[in-house]
Image (cartoon, coloured by chain):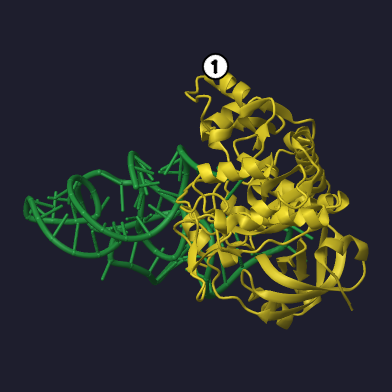
Chain colours: A yellow, B green
RNA sequence: UCCGGAAUAGCUCAGCGGUAGAGCGGGUGGCUGUUAACCACUAGGUCGGGGGUUCGAACCCCUCUUCCGGAGCCA
C-alpha cells in the first residue's frame, strides 16, 4: 500500500493508495458517503459506497465528524462530473480520533471569534492558502537574494539601543546590564556585516510597541533587511524593484491554486511585474495637492495620500529624495540638494501602503556624527556604528521589507493579521 | 492617544417598551452522486457586567468591561 500526498494523487490513478489527513466536510446520502479529506498538501473528495465498504466500516465512517483525523485507503479515479478533478473510491476507513464538535462551522464567523480560535482557524482553506503564499514570498525573497550574492547575516533580537527613537520599543530587564529592548530593525547591525561579507540580509521578527490599530499593522512582524557595500541610491532602488518583481513571478508560478482560493485578481498581479514608477517626494506633494490633499513639502505621506498616489497605477510607486528632517539620521544627503536625503519608500498599489523603506547610508564620519548629536542620540551607545565610518568606510545602501505587508498585497488578503500564523496586535496576545 | 461602531443560542445575526427568534452547527430518522448537500423532527438563552427610569427593559438613560473599524506612527 502506497502512502501518498493529495497533491500527487493524479500520478496514482487506478492504484491502491493510503491517505492520512483530516475531515474537512462529510455528507451522506443513503448508501453513499462523501468525506472531503485534507492532508496539508490539498483536498480530495473520497466516496464510500456501503455495499463495497461493508456495513460495519460504513457505520464507523458515518460517525466521523468535522476535523476528525483519519486514514483512508482507496483507488483514485477521475471525478464523474468534473474535468481534471479526482476522487478516491474508498476501500477502508481508519479513524484516528473522532473530533469533538468543531468550533469553526461552515458558515461565516466574526474576526474576534476566529482570532480567538486562530490555532484552529489556520486549518481553513483561505488561511491555508495565505500561509502557503507567505511561504512562497519568503522563499522567493531568499532565492533572489542568494542569486544576487547576498549572505544571510542574522541580527540580534535583544538589543541595547533603539534604531530610531525609544517610544515604540518593548523594554525588558537584562540581568545586571540594565534595560534591553526587542529589536525594531536589524539594519545598523547589517551595516557592520557588509564590511565583512559585501552583501548581507537578515530575516526575522521585529517589534514595534506602537498603539496602531489598522489593517496593516502588527506589534510583531517579520522583516527582511538587506544591505550592500558599494551600492548607491539608484542601484539600491533597482535591486528593490527586481526583488519585488521576482517575488511576484515566483508566487504566480508556485501558488496558482492558493491565489484562486483567495480570489486574487491575478491579472492585476501580472500587471505589477513591469517597471515601477518613480517620483520624488517634492513631485509627489505637488501631485497630491492637486488631488486635494493638504500635505505640505516637509510632511510624510498620510494613509490617504498613499491611496491617491497609487490609485491610478498598476505598479508599485517609489517615492524618493525625502526632506532630511522627516527621515532617519543615517540616511545620506542628496549631493544635489543638502535638504534632501537619498531615501526611498515603495508604495504598494491597492491601498496596502509602504512595502519597503530604503536609503543610501551616510558614510562620512563627521556628517553622521553631527547628525547624531543634533538628534541628541547617546553617542557612546553607537560608537560601534560610528566606527564603520573610520575603518574602510564605503558608499552603501540598504532597505527593509515588511513580509506580512508584501504577503497581504500579493495574496489580496484584506487584513495583515491573516498573513502570519499568530498575529500579535495591541489588544491580542492569545493564542 | 484620538474619532466612530458593536456586544442576544456553540457560531452569524434579526428583534429596538408588552410571552426570546431564524439560519448554520449538535442529536435522531430518511435518501445511490453530494458540493457551505437536501427533507422531517429535536435539544439549546441570567439578551456582556453593574446601576437607574418604567406597571413592565434585550430595547430608554448612566457607568464599567471587551472587541471591531479608522487616524496618527510606521514595514
Q: Position of residue A77 (x, y in %)?
A: 87, 62
* Above-or-below relation of A358 to A377: above
- Residue density around tag 1, few if under 14, some if 14–19, many if 20 or more, within 10 Å: few
Which residue reaches farthest bottom? A56
Q: Position of residue B56 (x, y in %)?
A: 13, 56
| Quadrant position of the N terminus of chain A in the picture | bottom right
Q: Position of residue A252 (x, y in %)?
A: 80, 45
Q: Is residue B55 left or right of residue A344?
A: left
Which residue reaches farthest top? A290
Residue A230 in sight here? yes
Q: Nearer the viewer, residue B2 or A324?
A: A324
Residue at numbered disc 1: A290
Q: Is residue A343 left or right of residue B5?
A: right
Q: Residue at x 62, y 64 (%)?
A: A157
Q: Position of residue A306 (x, y in %)?
A: 58, 32
Q: Secondary structure at mark 1?
A: helix
Q: Nearer the viewer, residue A287 or A367?
A: A367
Q: Residue at x 83, y 49 (%)?
A: A144
Q: Nearer the viewer, residue A115 or A409?
A: A409
Q: Is residue A153 left or right of residue A183?
A: right
What subunit carries mark 1?
A: A
* Above-or-below relation of A161 to A119: above
Residue A80 in sight here? no
* Above-or-below relation of A305 to B8: above
Q: Nearer the viewer, residue A72 or A209?
A: A209
Amino acid at each position: 500500500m502506497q502512502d501518498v500526498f493529495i497533491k500527487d494523487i493524479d500520478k496514482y490513478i487506478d492504484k491502491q493508495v493510503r491517505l492520512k489527513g483530516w475531515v474537512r466536510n462529510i455528507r451522506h446520502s443513503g448508501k453513499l458517503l462523501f468525506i472531503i479529506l485534507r492532508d496539508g498538501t490539498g483536498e480530495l473528495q473520497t466516496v464510500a459506497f456501503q455495499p463495497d465498504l461493508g456495513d460495519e466500516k460504513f457505520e464507523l465512517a458515518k460517525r466521523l465528524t468535522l476535523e476528525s483525523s483519519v486514514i483512508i485507503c482507496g483507488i483514485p479515479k477521475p471525478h464523474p462530473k468534473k474535468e481534471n478533478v479526482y476522487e478516491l473510491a474508498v476501500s477502508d476507513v481508519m479513524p484516528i480520533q473522532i473530533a469533538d464538535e468543531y468550533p469553526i462551522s461552515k458558515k461565516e464567523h466574526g474576526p474576534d471569534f476566529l482570532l480567538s480560535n486562530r490555532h484552529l482557524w489556520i486549518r481553513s482553506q483561505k488561511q491555508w492558502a495565505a500561509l502557503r503564499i507567505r511561504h512562497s514570498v519568503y522563499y522567493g525573497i531568499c532565492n533572489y537574494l542568494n542569486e544576487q550574492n547576498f549572505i544571510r547575516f542574522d541580527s540580534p533580537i535583544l538589543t541595547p539601543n533603539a534604531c530610531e527613537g525609544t517610544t515604540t520599543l518593548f523594554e525588558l530587564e537584562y540581568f545586571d546590564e540594565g534595560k534591553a529592548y526587542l529589536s525594531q530593525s536589524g539594519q545598523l547591525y547589517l551595516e557592520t556585516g557588509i564590511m565583512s561579507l559585501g552583501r548581507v540580509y537578515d530575516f526575522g521578527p521585529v517589534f514595534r510597541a506602537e498603539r496602531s490599530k489598522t489593517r496593516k499593522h502588527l506589534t510583531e512582524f517579520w522583516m527582511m533587511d538587506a544591505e550592500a557595500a558599494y551600492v548607491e541610491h539608484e542601484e539600491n532602488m533597482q535591486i528593490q524593484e527586481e526583488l519585488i518583481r521576482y517575488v511576484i513571478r515566483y508566487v504566480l508560478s508556485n501558488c496558482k491554486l492558493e491565489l484562486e482560493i483567495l480570489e486574487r485578481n491575478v491579472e492585476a498581479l501580472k500587471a505589477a511585474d513591469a517597471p515601477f514608477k518613480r517620483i520624488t517626494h517634492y513631485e509627489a506633494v505637488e501631485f497630491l495637492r492637486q488631488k486635494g490633499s493638504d500635505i505640505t513639502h516637509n510632511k510624510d505621506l498620510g494613509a490617504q495620500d498613499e491611496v491617491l498616489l497609487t490609485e491610478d497605477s498598476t505598479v508599485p510607486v517609489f517615492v524618493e529624495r525625502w526632506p532630511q528632517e522627516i527621515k532617519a539620521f543615517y540616511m545620506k544627503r542628496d549631493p544635489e540638494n543638502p535638504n534632501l536625503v537619498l531615501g526611498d519608500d515603495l508604495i504598494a498599489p491597492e491601498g496596502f501602503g509602504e512595502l519597503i523603506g530604503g536609503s543610501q547610508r551616510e558614510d562620512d564620519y563627521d556628517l553622521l556624527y553631527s547628525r547624531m548629536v543634533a538628534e541628541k542620540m547617546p553617542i557612546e551607545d553607537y560608537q560601534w556604528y560610528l566606527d564603520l565610518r573610520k575603518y574602510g568606510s564605503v558608499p552603501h545602501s540598504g532597505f527593509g521589507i515588511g513580509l506580512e505587508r508584501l504577503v497581504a498585497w500579493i495574496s489580496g488578503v484584506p487584513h495583515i493579521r491573516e498573513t502570519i500564523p499568530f498575529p500579535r496586535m495591541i489588544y491580542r496576545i492569545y493564542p
